[in-house]
Structures are given as C-alpha cells and as structure tokens.
Amino acid sequence: MTAYTWNDHTYDVVVVGAGGSGLRAALGCAQAGLKTACVSKVFPTRSHTVAAQGGISASLGNMGQDDWRWHMYDTVKGADWLGDQDAIEYMVRAAPAAVYELEHWGVPFSRTEEGKIYQRAFGGMTKNYGEASIQRTCAAADRTGHAMLHTLYGQSLKNAVDFFIEYFALDLIMENGACRGVTAIKLDDGTMHRYRAQRVILATGGYG
C-alpha cells in the first residue's frame, strides 16, 4: 500500500469553518496582515448560519431606553444561571459595536422611519431587570444569517483570505503539544492536503 501524496500549504493562520464566526475570524486575521486560509466543507454562504432568521440582540436603544446590564441580566436568567457570566458580560458589552461593524461592512439591517437600525421584540428581552418587555433584536428582515454570510464572505475576499471550499478537515497537526496546522481531504477528488500554520482557529459550529 503506497503512502498518501500530500499537497502542502503554508499560512500564518488557518480557520476551519466558514459560518458567521469562522468568516469573522478569517476576516479579522486578514485585516491584521496575516496570510489566512479558511477551510470549509461547504460553500461559505451555505454554512449553517444561513438558517438564522431572528436577528442579533444588542442594547442599541433605538426603540427605547436600553442598557447592556439589562441585556446581561436577561441572558444570565435565560440560561438558568448556568452560563459563564464573564463571557456573557463580554458578549453583551461588545454587541452594539459588533452590530455597527456588520452594518458598516454592508449588512442591510431593517430600518425605522428615522433611518436607525430597527429592533424587534423577542421573548426574554426586558428593561430594568425584568420590569417590562423591550425591543432589542437587530435583524435584516427574516434573512439575518443569509445577509451576514454574504457580507462577511465578500469582505473576506476583498481582504485576500484564501478559501478552500468543499475540503473536509480530518485532523490537527500537533507538535510538542502545540497545534501547528490541520489536514483535510478535498471532497471532489479525494486528494489530501496539509496546512501548516502558526495558529489554527476551529469555528466548526456547536458541540454537545
């Protein structure tokens, strides 16, 4: 039995996965001047983020008073107090800037008559720590995930991210306890590929 023939690639960063988080990670690395590859088993705009319809919650306050502390309270409560509260605090404080970032890149958020980003009501969103319901969720009609993927993919191409589409990641390359790359198979012809990188980012979706 002959050994596999490997096709070798060298990058500063390899991102595995091209959903919302994978594309955002790849874009950020490329913008920082790093030679970046993104390996995905499907075309990026078909990643599962495309199924996200509802929107992105952020305390913009466009539909009435809001505060990141109220958003944090709702998120901690909604997770039955099982969530990592440090991570939740970081998320809710960063959420408005993340929404504006997506807007500036081109996500076509729905608008109020005044031109502000429209925010819709969802269950569990309250003001003043549960006192009354609030509108906090920013959406691009009912296609928020679709709009995000198309925008992030376009921005990633603009910033010279190299995409390896319909490549299935197989294993991590480990050297002395450190991850130095990934291996993958190209789905249409079965060729084997080896990606060497200083950093590997796994953005492969939910687990458990």
Image (tube, helix red, strand yellow):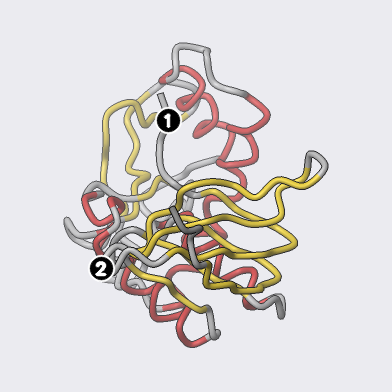
Image check: 39 left or right of 119? right
Q: Position of residue 142 (x, y in %)?
A: 17, 56
Amino acid bearing label 1? Tyr
Q: Position of residue 150 (x, y in %)?
A: 31, 72
Image check: 11 left or right of 27? right
Q: Which residue is mark 1?
A: 207
Q: Earlier in the sequence, mark 2 or mark 1?
A: 2
Disc 2 residue crowd, few under 14, some 14–19, many 20+, Cα 10 Å: few
Comparing 207 with 96, the one in front is 207
User: Residue placed farthest to the right in the image?
Assistant: 176
Comparing 107 with 193, the one in front is 193
Relative to 190, is 131 above or below? above
Relative to 129, is 157 above or below? below
Q: Which residue is mark 2?
A: 188
* Residue 112, quarter of the rendered image: bottom left
Disc 1 residue crowd, few under 14, some 14–19, many 20+, Cα 10 Å: few
Relative to 91, is 123 above or below? above
Amino acid bearing label 2? Asp
Q: Position of residue 68 (x, y in %)?
A: 57, 40
User: Residue placed farthest to the front in the image?
Assistant: 1
Labels 2 and 1 touching (C-beta < 8 A):
no
Q: Secondary structure at mark 1?
A: loop
Of the numbered discs in the image, which one, if any, rests on residue 139?
A: none
In the image, what residue occupies the spot 50% across and 34% down? Answer: 71
Distance in Å between CA atoms under marks 2 and 1? 27 Å
